Amino acid sequence: MDTPSSTAASDRHDGAWVLRYEGFDPAQEGLRESLCALGNGYLTTRAAFPEARADDVHYPGTYVAGLYDRAVSHIAGRRVENEDLVNLPNWLPMTFRADDGAWFAGTVEELVEHRIVLDLRRGVMQRQARVRDSAGRVTQMTQRRLVHMAHPHLAALETVLVPENWSGTLTVRSAIDGAIRNRGVRRYRGLADEHLGGFRRHTIGDDAMLLETETLASRVRVAVAARTCVAAGGPPIATDRWTELRRIGEDLTFDAIEGEPVGVEKVVAIYTGRDPAIADPATAARQAVTEAGDFDALLVAHIRRWTELWGRCRLDFDLGPHSDGEASARLYSFHILQTLSAHTAALDAGVPARGLHGEAYRGHVFWDELFVLPYLNLRLPDVSRGLLRYRYRRLDAARAAARAAGFRGAMFPWQSGSDGREETPAMHLNPRSGRWLEDHSHRQRHVGAAIAYNVWTYYQATGDGAYLAAEGAELLVEIARFWADIATFDPVIGRYRIRGVMGPDEYHDGYPWSDAAGLDDNAYTNVLASWVLRKAAHALTVLPEYRRAELGERIGLHHNEPAHWEHVARKLRVCFHDGVISQFHRYGELAELDWERYRKQYGDIRRLDRILEAEGDTPNRYKASKQADVLMLAYLFSPAELVELLAYMGYETDPGLWGRTTRYYLDRTAHGSTLSSVVHAWVLARGDRGGSGRFLREALASDVHDIQGGTTAEGIHLGAMAGCLDLLTRGYPGLEVREDALRLDPVLPEGAGPLEFRMRYRGHWGVHVRITRRSTAVKLRPGQSTAIRVQIQDNEHTVHAGETFRVLLGGKA
């Protein structure tokens, strides 16, 4: 291609359901591979070219939810063990050549024309290209691929080739490539990256092949089977099967005629030793690939399942004529649904911070579920419950971690993987300075409070008392026990204090005047801990008496513990300075940063921590945050709840406190995380609609336009994507589930038009909400018997199946 160019835009004619890339731009290929990745909640495959191998342009990757492996590296004289989400054998390889020419490699020089179209509605990626080889032979190529949403183990690739100016022999090569390493994140290179071994290769009948392998440390068996057959044109004149140490493939040779299509389709089955209801992965993969239908048959069932999902997760809104916000929201919905599905709920898997789309953060599970589950609770609650079970299964590991640290209860890890131990690396690389640094982020103990928050909000949204009795209350109680024990009473101030932790900000991991790691009395941590202690005590009263007694006996719960929790909850310390809430104790003593100088010198200062460290400085010295910390409280709780929370803790607040606190920290935040824009859009929704709208637009653009500068290529930002959707369907609508009622107090961001979405609430599968600047309406589908209480602003009504409750905003129903 002489002058490569590319654009990414929504296809307006198709209602923002299409993501399209024109041309081939090697510099943007990593971003496209992440954004056009296909998955089904069990597995995800990046949108790498089938003819490509991993290099500085392409990075093929296929990942199965929850499949990790460990490897040991030696860094700066230390032995460091990391656990990675494993990049599995590449099932995509498919290429061709004309006569005895070179195999098509997908280079800029070969591609005369190139287009990728991701159909979000159907979950299908289509690629169209015109390819010219060194002899001037031009071949049209059309490819379709899917990762099956109905059958979690199946994927398929269809390739149709049309010789444009030549006739002769056309050879198509299909393979499974096991020569794979985890090398998708540049800053991890140089560390141990090999996770597969013990390869075995098999043929299956006349048209299928199987590659078996095993993870090196976790010893999980993996089987990838592929069936390659003719879909258009005559049969091959020759078939040649071949094997290498880590690869297996076959070459199909055809008599090609100018203008006549030759079609080949590849159907793939992937199983692992962690899958339920199988004898072994190889047998299961062999059977699945043999019994699977052709591409078109698979496509029918695949589209049917996507249609069901979109019906439950409909979201329509307008941010104005020059905004592609609706297209971004559809794309983000698509990635949430194909990363976390009913298939995920059946596995032992959590919410990976970067989806199953790449290897950033090594595929670990952080607190991002705090931004994801509130959205799923009101659409796919069974998925939420499955993801919460990931945490429950690791409760014993969290108890052990607390005991090892000298505390009672459960201390969950900041980064979690296969078995619940702390996976946060001991060191991290600053690519700007090239130095390996101590990593103290495991001190973000607030992850446990996030888990407790998710337990309670799931219960509130679903009314699932069986879950609360079986698992949820136990999680709440053990997390509360931890907070009650880590909090120490200071008799001088008459308050409980939580010391040596990190807040969500992440720029601050210690005091500049101390060698000790951690900070004291982080406001977000302490207020949320107070909330957890209260909710745990309340959850026990909700349980049936017999279940409360069973739980208490099993975990050794003393009868006076709930009273102690409530005492600690009332007396936890919150610090203030200059009329605002302090992010942590002595925050007001830190220096002010010269923001203007750093912006002028560096331009993009989102990763201010790396800039300062490269200068020999540290963000610990400054009033500068990576992302929302104190303001996260206003993300989780309504203004009225925040006032009540602080009042319960003994802090009376004046009406201007939150406004002052918001402005104070907005002026001191670098927005070094994609989550930051989501949180600030939410926080500003009711006080600064213009500012909220600007943050919303930035959040919606964060992955589509890769505003973090190359990070999306390493995996999508799942929490930020879900946070955007939650902001649109819960934040701006002012939607809360409290006291067995659905409550809405809507306010649309500046410039936004009608907002319309569907949700599931307390057994009602089709609650339809429509919000305009003039009115709000809630409609229930007919045919369901139970009525629900709905409150819109100050108007309340019991809505029955088939009814619509409509309120003029600022007026009456």
Image (spheres, rainbow, N blue to C red):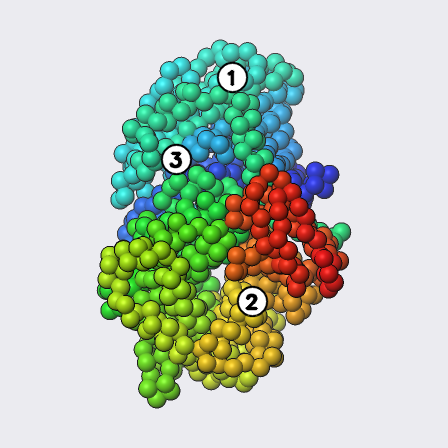
As helix, strand or loop, the secondary structure at mark 2 comes to loop
Image position, residue 454 (x, y; %): 44, 57
**Residue 405 in view here:** no
Image position, residue 478 (x, y; %): 32, 62
The dot on residue 752 is none
Task: Say whether disc 1 or disc 2 marks the residue closer to the N-terminus.
Answer: 1
Q: Which residue is under mark 3?
A: 89
Q: Which image quadrant is residue 618 in?
A: bottom left
**Amino acid type of the residue that numbered disc 3 sits on in the rendered structure:** Pro
The dot on residue 638 is 2
Q: Which image quadrant is residue 533 in?
A: bottom left
The residue at 37%/57% (across/down) is: 543
**Residue 647 in view here:** yes
On-image quarter of the N terminus: top right
Pointer 3 and pointer 2: residues touching (CB < 8 Å)? no
| Vertical position of residue 575 compared to residue 689: above or below | below
Q: Which residue is under mark 1?
A: 230
Mark 1 neighbour class, 10 Å CA radius: few under 14, some 14 to 19, many 20 or more: some
Mark 3 neighbour class, 10 Å CA radius: few under 14, some 14 to 19, many 20 or more: many
Task: Say whether disc 1 or disc 3 marks the residue closer to the N-terminus.
Answer: 3
